[in-house]
Image (spheres, grey):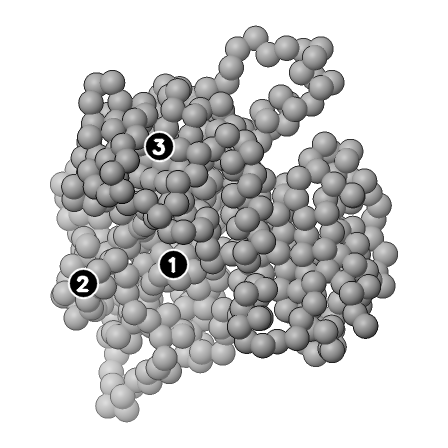
Amino acid sequence: MSTPKSVPKNQKNSVVNYDYDVIVIGTGPGGEGSAMKLAKAGKKVAVIEKYKDIGGGCTHWGTIPSKALRHSVSQLIELKNNALFNNRYPQQHSFTFADVLRHTEQVVGKQVKMRASFYNRNNCSLFFGSASFVDNHTVQISHADGSVEKITAKDIVIATGSRPYHPDDINFNAPNVYDSDTILSLDYQPKNIIIYGAGVIGCEYASIFRGLSVKTDLINTRDRLLSFLDAEMSDAISYHFRNSGIILRHDEEYQKVESTKEGVVVHFKSGKKMKADCLLYANGRTGNTDQLNLQNVGLTPDGRGQLSINEYYQTAVENIYAVGDIIGYPSLASAAYDQGRIAANLIITGEGKRKLIKDIPTGIFTIPEISSVGKTEQMLTQQKVPYEVGRAQFKDLARSQILGSEVGSLKILFHRETREILGIHCFGERAAEIIHIGQAIMEQPGEGNTLDYFANTTFNYPTMAEAYRVAALNGLNRLF
């Protein structure tokens, strides 16, 4: 990784009048993080959004709607499983995908209104239209009415996000073939669905559809579900999926997808055929860089539409930055926001002192949730680190028993000698919230990060946080 480039001496005294200090392209988490920090530092900021509303893919098609859907379905499952309500107040009709979408639309509307107020309060100039580069200081905006205008800035931040990958041999215009964006337009309740791609998005939607009693086939092109996770967490979600009725098929690749009036038929290279009412293709994403005319500034994205950057999010062109999904890993909304702020910090100060944290938590909003931070058991074994494990089973916690949500566990990995916490893995409801307690301790310097903190701390009772004390004591009991 390279360091920030300095301005040549012969250019330091030259004065160029730009329309803005910075142009930010995209209003998702990365663009918002950049724009807000720049504006609060007194920079004159222009923000360009291609869609009719601000928020980016995160707000309109990705994180927010899918998590709102997941929450509604999770509540339905909870209602079905609660004998108190199920026996006394029988449901008059089954909820459909379209029913739960109504809640999603309300959440998206609130998010758009709130985020639009951020830009207004901080005096950012908002432009709605498609952005493309004229040169490394000039951006052309093509508006929906056909008009075109150009604006200039000293620095430019690209935060255009990503979209679902579309293989050329699948007809996504067919009425029963969807991707993770268009699935939000599904206006009927399918009896069965095939989800191709068992990554985070595929697994989350498998939970949603199965929670709505849709027969769900989840096709995984790899040999294990969510193989980047700690193996125990991967095994747990696989077991839970099968137990809920999801059919898992590993190591499968499609040969062709046939769309008919009756549904969709997927032909696999293994010789198998599967039929369903519809197909959700959720296997990979592509960076939104193809319409930016990057050749005009000498930038070339890779085959996935992603740009290379240094550790300060500068591209090969020193005044052009890239953040969020268009730079690849970790492709998380949370990380994109911080990336935008780090890039903005360099623009403001000229110094690259801020960096993204090393251990970024992973939150997977399946039903139940999965969340992890730090090393897995497999990593520590491979690195020959002498570690031990402390576990807490949710079924043993009073709060879980009260909530009727006893599926899940918390696992703490720690160094046998120093008791330093090396990794935390959680499976169960509210896992994405629970993980942050452990993350806060892991981030403490030196002796502040040890298992003893959890063993010696008094937690509210009954709470889910108490799982940390239970897991810590369990781990200490394993030492000898």
Q: Where is residue 248 in the image (x, y as percent from the top left)?
A: 43, 39
Foreground: 126 or 131? 131
Label whose residue precedes the other's in the sequence (1 or 2): 2
Provide the residue designation for mark 2.
Answer: 294
Q: Where is residue 15 in the image (x, y as percent from the top left)?
A: 26, 79
Secondary element at tag 3: strand
In the image, 398: left or right of 269? right
Provide the residue designation for mark 1.
Answer: 324
Report how far apart the C-alphas of labels 2 and 3 lie in the structure. Answer: 37 Å
In the image, 220: left or right of 138? right
Q: Where is residue 362 in the image (x, y as percent from the top left)?
A: 53, 55
Do we see residue 464 in this rendering? yes
Give the quadrant of residue 178: top left
In the rendered structure, which amino acid carries the disc numbered 1?
Gly
Secondary element at tag 2: helix
In the rendered structure, which amino acid carries the disc numbered 2?
Leu
> Could you tell me if the residues under marks 3 and 1 are in contact, i.e. CB atoms within 8 Å?
no
Label whose residue precedes the other's in the sequence (3 or 1): 3
What residue lies at 37% left-to-right and 21% top-to-bottom? 190
In the rendered structure, which amino acid carries the disc numbered 3?
Ile
Provide the residue designation for mark 3.
Answer: 194
Secondary element at tag 1: helix
Decide: few, some or many residues near mark 3? Use Cα within 10 Å; few <14, some 14-19, many ≥20: many
Report how far apart the C-alphas of labels 3 and 1 lie in the structure. Answer: 29 Å
Label whose residue precedes the other's in the sequence (2 or 3): 3
Image quarter in which the N terminus is found: bottom left
Residue 61, placed above or below residue 187: below
Label 2 or label 3, whichever lies nearer to me, is 3
In the image, 228: left or right of 26? right
